[in-house]
Amino acid sequence: MTATPGPHPRGARNPGSQGALRHLNQERLVEFLLANGPSTQAELARGTGLSTATVSNIVRDMAGKGVVSTSPVTSSGRRALLVQLADTGDVAVGIDFGRRHVRIVLATLGYEVTAERQLALEPGYDVMTAVRETAGLLDAMLAEGGHDRESVLSVGVGIPGPIDRRTGTVLQGAILPEWVGITRRELEQAFRFPVVVGNDANLGALGEVTWGANRGVRNLIFVKIGTGIGAGLILNGQPYYGYLGITGELGHTPVAEHGVICRCGNRGCLETVASTSVMIELLGRGSSSPVTTADVLRRGLERDPAVIRVVSDAGTAIGRAIGNVANVINPELVLVGGPLVGLGDTLLDPIRLGIQHNAIPVIAGTTRVSVSSLGDRAESLGAAALVIQGALAGED
Ligand SMILES: [Zn+2]
């Protein structure tokens, strides 16, 4: 990354010099583009606090030097200029491990996906075997793209479980128990690259605000409804990690005082009444053959009354839990991800109702609820964004 100014002690420059000021402003634009992806000049001005005239001058200058490229777009019905960091040859790798798949994306610093692959995994797979297989696939993708190993900035890995950010270790409570205890160091040994790890829901949230149709949303809850129910939070434009990195454990919000014991050890957690496994179990009681998540989706689209009822009860419970959080953080948008998003409003309307039950009217009335714009790509793209955002920090 030769084009990006490195971190110098700012006091070392003459603060009055125009050149130094211009340099600092250019640095701010580059930082903003790394953090947020391609942005219009208006977004750059809003995001950095610089005037539109200053932004337009610096962008022209940077485009002349080949640091950024620009392209005309339409933004809110107006013509605008989209600014994007030029391809430096650096590669950000984003990887998402799910229950049955792993997805790999390669991306440039300008948030362009240059390669994408998915590999099916056996349920209950051996983690380190799958990681080594993935490392082999990554090596093949890099070779196909003509990238040498030095061009890889780092590898972002999304894992379906809580991660202690102090050590990069997967903690108890992971939906895939096989992942518990796996450390960042083990992943680095397998990939032979620096690795950053993230919880899948956190990365999904980051993916949505950096790559998706919801790019630039500054306060967001991304809720993934699957075998577990996890949430990723974006607060004031930044992923929120809390003290240890364990946030958004929405599935462990108690909702039934006398409910069943949850895998976390508490009683009546949201996950024990509203996960896809619970829906499948409830629907399976009246059925001679096992019900799958795909059946829930198909029958829901056919308006099967039992499915509608189960989804409605689960959605309302999830909405109530979201409503509690919404009262505290006042999100602009709630995005729902997971295998049932194809149900659309059949799933979203009960969630909206649950939010209305628990959030104060002005919050319930202004919080939009929608489905993920990136589908099953959100987590891997978020993992790549995590790498791109770390590009400046890792440069010195
Ligand atoms: Zn629990």
Image: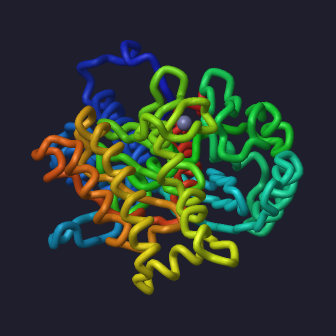
Q: From what the image shows, is residue 322 above or below residue 84?
A: above
Farthest residue, direction left: 362
Whole-percent x and y of residue 249? 49, 37
Q: Residue furthest bottom?
A: 302
Q: Is residue 91 visible?
A: no
- Residue beneath the point at 37% across and 13% down: 11
Residue 92 pos. (x, y %): 62, 51
The x, y position of residue 391, in whole percent, is 56, 39
Q: How many marks?
A: 0
- Front one among 103 and 90: 103
Q: For the point 45% across and 25% down, which residue is it?
A: 242
**The image quarter in which residue 156 lies:** top right
- Determine if residue 73 is in view: yes
Is 146 left, or right, of 258 in this rendering? right
Residue pictured at 64% horizontal, 60% vertical: 105
For this view, does 117 lie left or right of residue 255? right
Q: Please, is residue 375 above or below residue 364 in the view?
A: below
Quadrant of the rendered image holding ligand 1: top right
- Horizontal placement of 297 versus 363: left or right? right
Please give the name of the residue rendered at 16% of the width and 73% of the height, measured from the top-left corner: 77
Which of the two residues, 4 or 176, is positioned nearer the viewer here?
Answer: 176
The vertical placement of 281 against 360, above or below, is: below
